[in-house]
Image (cartoon, grey):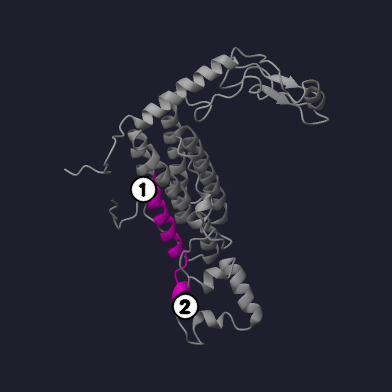
C-alpha cells in the first residue's frame, strides 16, 4: 500500500513565475527520461524480483516510491512557475490581464510561443502540469524497460539514471532562478545516488556478465571488425584484453575478405580465449539451473497469497 505525506521530500521554492521554463521542465514530468518513467520502470521490475531477490524487491520499491516523490516535486515546481497564468486563464472577462496582452493575432502567437513553447499547455491543461514532454508528446508505457531479469534490468536502470541526470544538468542552463536551480540540483544528485544503488545491487548478483543466462559463443565474443576504409583507430575496445571476459581482442582488418574466406564465419574456432564451446554449454546449463532454483526456491504449489498479515 502507499501512504501519501503531503509535505514534499524537498522544499520547492521559486523566485518568480516563469511559464517558459515550466514548459521545459515538463520533460522531467512526462518525458522519456523523466520521473514518472523512472517510477513506473522500477515499480514494474520489482514484481519479478520479489521471490528470487527479496532484497532487490525492497530496493526497487523504495526507489520507485522516491521517484513518485520526485514527480511530485517536479509537478509542484511547474505549478509554482505558472502562478498567475493559470489563474488568468480562468478569468473569462475580456479585460483580464492575459487578454490585454494578447490583443491581435500577432500578440497571441507571440504569447503562445514565448510562454509555453506549445499551445497544448495553454488550451488543454489551463496552466497545470501535463503528462507530456516539453513538446506536448503524451507519456507512454513504451518508455519502460523491464525484461524480468535483474542483470538486464539493473543495467537499464543505471542508464535511466544517467539520462535523467544529464537532462537536469541541461535544464539548469535555462533558468536563472536560484531556488529552481536548488531543486534541480537536489533531483540531479538523487540520480547519482540511485545509479550507485543499482550498480551495487548488480554487483551482488554473481555471475552477472554476460547479462541473463546464456554465455555467448567464444568464436565471436572477441572479434572486432574494422568497418572503415581509413583511419584505423585502435584502443582498449579493439586491442588488448576485453574488460569482462578477459579475452584477447581479435582485430579483423578486412571484414569482407574474412567473411568470404570463412564461408560466413562458419566452422571457425575460438581464438585469443580460453573459453571453449564445451565449457560454454556446461556454464549455460549450470547457470540455467541456478537462476531457475532462485526463482522457484520460495514458490509453493497450490494457492498463493502476496502478503502475510500479522
User: Badges 2 and 1: C-beta atoms under 8 Å apart?
Assistant: no
* Relative image position of residue 121 (x, y in whole percent): 53, 68
For this rendering, which residue is in front, 151 or 97? 151
Q: Residues within 10 Å of mark 1 (few under 14, many from 20)?
A: some
Q: Secondary structure at mark 2?
A: helix
Looking at the rendering, the stretch of residues picked out in magenta corresponds to 64-87
Q: Is residue 262 visible?
A: yes
* Relative image position of residue 203 (x, y in whole percent): 44, 27
Q: Main secondary structure of the magenta part?
A: helix
For this rendering, which residue is in front, 9 or 263? 263
Question: Quarter of the image holding residue 278?
Answer: top right
* Relative image position of residue 233 (x, y in whole percent): 75, 26
Residue named by callout 1? 65
The vertical placement of 60 against 208, above or below, is below
The vertical placement of 180 against 164, above or below, is below
Q: Is residue 177 magenta?
A: no
Residue 258 placement, left or right of 189 = right
For this rendering, which residue is in front, 113 or 157? 157
The vertical placement of 229 against 191, above or below, is above
Q: Is residue 75 magenta?
A: yes
Q: Of the residues under marks 2 and 1, which one precedes in the sequence?
A: 1
* Relative image position of residue 250 (x, y in whole percent): 70, 19
Q: Is residue 177 visible?
A: no
> Which residue occupies the extreme bottom position in the image?
94
Residue named by callout 2? 88
Quadrant of the rendering where the C terminus is positioned: top left
> Which residue occupies the extreme top position in the image?
274
Give the residue displayed 69% in from the left and 23% down from the top: 223
The vertical placement of 288 against 271, above or below, is below
Amino acid at each position: 500500500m502507499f501512504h501519501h505525506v503531503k509535505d514534499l521530500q524537498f522544499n520547492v521554492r521559486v523566485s518568480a513565475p516563469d511559464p517558459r521554463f515550466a514548459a521545459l521542465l515538463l520533460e522531467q514530468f512526462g518525458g522519456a527520461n523523466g520521473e514518472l518513467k523512472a517510477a513506473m520502470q522500477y515499480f514494474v521490475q520489482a514484481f519479478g524480483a520479489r521471490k528470487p531477490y527479496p532484497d532487490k524487491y525492497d530496493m526497487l520499491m523504495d526507489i520507485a516510491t522516491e521517484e513518485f516523490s520526485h514527480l511530485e516535486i517536479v509537478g509542484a515546481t511547474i505549478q509554482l512557475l505558472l502562478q498567475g497564468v493559470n489563474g488568468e486563464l480562468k478569468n473569462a472577462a475580456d479585460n483580464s490581464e492575459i487578454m490585454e496582452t494578447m490583443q491581435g493575432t500577432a500578440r497571441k502567437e507571440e504569447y503562445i510561443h514565448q510562454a509555453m513553447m506549445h499551445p497544448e499547455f495553454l488550451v488543454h491543461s489551463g496552466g497545470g502540469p501535463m503528462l507530456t514532454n516539453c513538446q506536448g508528446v503524451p507519456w507512454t508505457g513504451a518508455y519502460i524497460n523491464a525484461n524480468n531479469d535483474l542483470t538486464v534490468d539493473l543495467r537499464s536502470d543505471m542508464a535511466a539514471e544517467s539520462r535523467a541526470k544529464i537532462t537536469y544538468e541541461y535544464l539548469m542552463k535555462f533558468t536563472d532562478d536560484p531556488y529552481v536551480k536548488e531543486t534541480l540540483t537536489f533531483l540531479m544528485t538523487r540520480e547519482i545516488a540511485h545509479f550507485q544503488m543499482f550498480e551495487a545491487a548488480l554487483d551482488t548478483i554473481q555471475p552477472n556478465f554476460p547479462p541473463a543466462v546464456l554465455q555467448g559463443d567464444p568464436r565471436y565474443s572477441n572479434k572486432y571488425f574494422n568497418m572503415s576504409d581509413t583511419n584505423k583507430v585502435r584502443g582498449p575496445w579493439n586491442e588488448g584484453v576485453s574488460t569482462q571476459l578477459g579475452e584477447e581482442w581479435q582485430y579483423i582488418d578486412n571484414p569482407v575478405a574474412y567473411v568470404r574466406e570463412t564461408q560466413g564465419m562458419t566452422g571457425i574456432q575460438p581464438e585469443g580465449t580460453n573459453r571453449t564451446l564445451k565449457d560454454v554449454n556446461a556454464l549455460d546449463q549450470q547457470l540455467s539451473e541456478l537462476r531457475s532454483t532462485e526463482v522457484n526456491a520460495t514458490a509453493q504449489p497450490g494457492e498463493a497469497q502476496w502478503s502475510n498479515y500479522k
